Image (cartoon, rainbow, N blue to C red):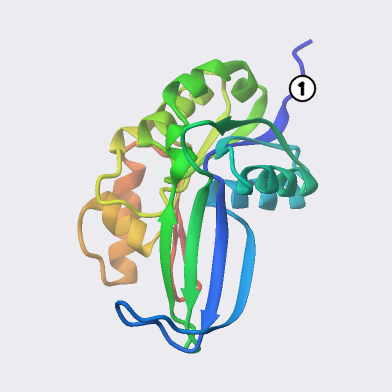
């Protein structure tokens, strides 16, 4: 009898959020006083893993942090959420990914993301953990690690009958479309749909057409989330 599979593996990013709330954004060279500060674990990959674990799925993450104070903190927070962190490596050459976020009183935000150790998650790492990936029902990938690494992880998953889910966030103008034939479920927002189709889209009908176009490139399911709190599912 074949061994039973775990539910979800995330191949992706771990980013520590540093959030300052202030009345207004500083001008160049200016220092303004903050009203409140928060610090917490984040990253698109880690967020997917925590969400899956909270929904009751057995979930693991393949990722990389730095040998700094944020590395162990993020690993501990993932573990407390019920995520298997045994395949999170510590880099000796790069820092843990960080997002430095400033939020104004109007609710506008300014964000600087430094991906650090996340960019060291490699195709080799996916190949090293082939059997671990194969032991899951679903793999989730995003765009905060190297796209070639994402492609290799999805290829390996496909070879072993693991359902593949790709959310190309954050949107990049040079998205590797060769990933699409290895994607079972593609989920994009409006911005990402424009990047991946390389055109400006202004109507719901336009996003529907884009979703149909993306279906032709390999995914079995395409989801487009719209700002109007609607989604297109094909």
Indicate whether 11 appears above or below 74.
Answer: above
In the rendered image, the quadrant that contains the N terminus is top right
Indicate whether 159 appears above or below 58.
Answer: above
Give the residue drawn at x 33%, y 56%.
193
Residue at which label 1 appears: 4
The spot of residue 5 in percent (x, y) is: 72, 25
Q: Nearer the viewer, residue 222 or 78?
A: 78
The spot of residue 80 in percent (x, y) is: 79, 47
Query: In the image, 105: left or right of 176?
Result: right
SS of the residue under disc 1: loop
Give the residue drawn at x 51%, y 84%.
33
Mark 1 residue crowding within 10 angstroms, few (<14) / some (14–19) / many (20+) = few
Give the residue drawn at x 55%, y 39%.
66
In this figure, what is the number of numbered marks?
1
The spot of residue 59 in percent (x, y) is: 71, 38
Determine the image quadrant of residue 139. Answer: top right
The residue sitting at the left extreme is: 199
Query: In the image, 178: left or right of 33?
Result: left
Is residue 181 visible in the rendered image? The answer is: yes
The spot of residue 50 in percent (x, y) is: 68, 50
Q: Nearer the viewer, residue 200 or 27?
A: 27
């Amino acid at each position: 009898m074949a061994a039973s599979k775990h539910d979800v593996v995330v191949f992706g990013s771990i980013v520590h959020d540093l959030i300052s709330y202030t009345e207004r954004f500083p001008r160049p060279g200016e220092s303004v006083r903050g009203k409140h500060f928060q610090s917490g674990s984040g990253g698109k990959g880690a967020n997917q893993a925590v969400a899956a674990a909270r929904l009751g799925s057995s979930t693991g993450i393949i990722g990389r942090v730095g040998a700094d104070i944020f590395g162990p903190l993020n690993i501990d927070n993932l573990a407390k959420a019920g995520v298997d962190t045994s395949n999170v490596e510590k880099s000796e050459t790069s820092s843990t990914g960080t997002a430095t976020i400033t939020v104004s009183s109007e609710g506008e935000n300014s964000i600087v993301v430094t991906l650090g150790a996340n960019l060291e998650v490699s195709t080799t790492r996916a190949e090293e953990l082939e059997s671990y990936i194969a032991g899951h029902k679903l793999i989730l990938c995003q765009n905060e690690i190297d796209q070639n690494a994402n492609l290799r992880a999805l290829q390996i998953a496909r070879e072993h009958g693991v359902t593949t889910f790709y959310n190309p966030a954050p949107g990049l103008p040079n998205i590797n479309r060769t990933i699409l034939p290895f994607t079972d479920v593609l989920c994009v927002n409006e911005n990402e749909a424009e990047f991946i189709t390389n055109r400006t889209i202004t109507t719901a009908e336009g996003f529907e057409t884009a979703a149909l176009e993306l279906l032709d490139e390999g995914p079995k399911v395409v989801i487009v989330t719209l700002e109007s709190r609607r989604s297109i599912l094909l």
